[in-house]
Amino acid sequence: MKHAAHPRSLVELFTSWLWGFHPRSLPPMQRTNYARELLSWAFLPIMLGAIEGGTMSVLVKKAWTGVPGISPELLDFAVAFVSAAPNFANLTSFIWARVSRGRDKIRFISTIQIGTCLCVAAVAAMPLNAWGLLGTCILVLLARAAWTGVITVRAAVWRQNYPKERRASIAGKMASVQSVMLALAGWIVGASMDFSPQSFHITFPVLAIVGLYGNSIFRGVRLRGAGRLARSERAESGRSTISANPMHTAAMAGDALHTNWRVLVEDRGYRQFMIWMFVFGMGNLMIGAPQAIVLEDGLGASYLQAILATTVIPLITMPLIIPIWARLLDRVHVVRFRAIHSWSFVAAAGTLWLAASLGQLWLFYVAGAFMGVGFAGGALAWNLGHQDFATPERDALYMSVHVTLNGIRGVIAPFLAVGLYKSLGAWGLQNWTFGACFLINTIGAVGFVLQWRGMQRRGTDHEYVRYPEIGADEGEVPTDPR
């Protein structure tokens, strides 16, 4: 009888976890928005998965290998570019934050989601030649730039619609669904490309259409307190508009950069947090491009094998770990969270170093699982961590500081990694590139620990910066004391 009880407890545990995704697990006021968002994030990531960094790195490396007019060196730097594209795009975050101020957030996000879908569909028109490689790189960059706007503005939507004590768990559920669908998209791209290297001409438009369906669902989301939030944002810095005058746009960008810089100057805690994020993130962002190169040049992995290592395994690991990280982030300050979470990426970089040195594909899969553990926590802290520092009306601004700094390191890291890989390759030490990633990650992880200990010494280790939320226009009671 005791043996029979054990399986039932596992079933009950799984059922309880699955029930946590149901809208009825939330208070009535949050259910409708949550249900629409959750469903939309079941379809939008299928489109996004087509241009996910690991998937595109493998696709570009393998599809354009041996194409006349494209040297191996040029191709490897193209791999670095598509790996860096999400972070190149992050440099536009401060513009999205500025342009979205005072605007209808749901309509704004919906519009740029459509732009992302169109760019993904356009990849299908690219031929397998030098011009097609250039066009693919540009379209991936444009798609990721549009999606940066979604990420930047979405944080403000989540802050208004969900209370602090549930926000990380709700974001975790959405990230879990998103990761599964991204993994499915990666598997579809990998399997279809193994079947025919020309299959992306059909696959990408189909995935984009699925994304458009997800967008149609997202448009039904309602932002609580939208009117008061818009007025508060306008009072903070006025409403900005996109102008056809390039001088006006340049001036707006310069002003936004100055505003971001002022945040770092004035907020000592956030500045220190961003410094360690910069170091830690540099090591993470150096990994993707050399990983795709090693899997092709060193191991001769197929499309599906390589995408399993870079994309599918990390993403399917995430839903298993996200609930653990979500419970932690709901209870602690983001600095404490990063002081614990960052070591998962240290383990991933160390395992990749070992995998590349031994030339063992199965170790790349193990490293992918470690990356998934790290991504699970990163998906939460990325979207919500800045809110432990920011006031409600400055939410998008603080998020844009984070995303823009990530863009700066993301522009540098993949090209630095490929350059280092090529340089070390002259001495047969190219796999030590992953050793450099391991060292940089370790320094960043230690930095978070030191910052947290500093907070403990100052007695601020249990404190959040709490501000009242922007209340709804129709008498709704704010649910988050910040």
Image: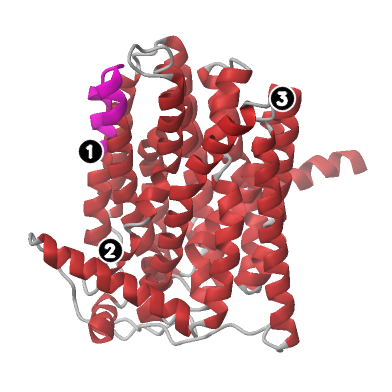
- The residue where tag 2 is placed is 95
- Judge whether residue 453 is colored magenta: no
Q: Quadrant of residue 357 in the image? A: top right
Earlier in the chain: of badge 1 and badge 2, it is 2
Q: Is residue 132 magenta?
A: yes
Give the residue furthest to the right.
2
Q: Nearer the viewer, residue 447 or 340?
A: 447
Which residue type carries mark 1? Leu
Nearer to the camera, 168 or 240: 240
Residue drawn at the location 50% of the way across and 71% of the way down? 386
Secondary structure at badge 1 equals helix
Residue occupying the point 54% across, 68% down? 274
Crowd class of label 2 (few under 14; some 14 to 19; many from 20; radius 10 Å): many
| First of labels 1, 3 by sequence position | 1
Magenta region, residue range: 118-135
Sort mark 3 into few (<14), some (14-19) or many (20+) by Cα contacts within 10 Å: few
Q: Residue 233: x, y in percent? A: 27, 80
From mark 1 to mark 2, how far is it between C-alphas?
21 Å
Sequence-first tag of 3 and 2: 2
Residue 18 visible? The answer is: no
| Residue at x-position 60% and y-position 30% | 309
Q: Amino acid at mark 3?
A: Trp
Which mark is drawn over residue 118?
A: 1
Q: Nearer the viewer, mark 3 or mark 2?
A: 2
Type of secondary structure dominating the magenta stretch: helix
Give, as a three-letter code, the residue at label 2.
Ile
Locate residue 25, reporting x and y percent: 53, 61
Relative height, residue 432 to residue 61 (above, below):
below
Which residue is the site of mark 3? 362
Q: Secondary structure at mark 2?
A: helix
Report if the CB atoms under discs 1 and 2 are less than 8 Å apart. Answer: no
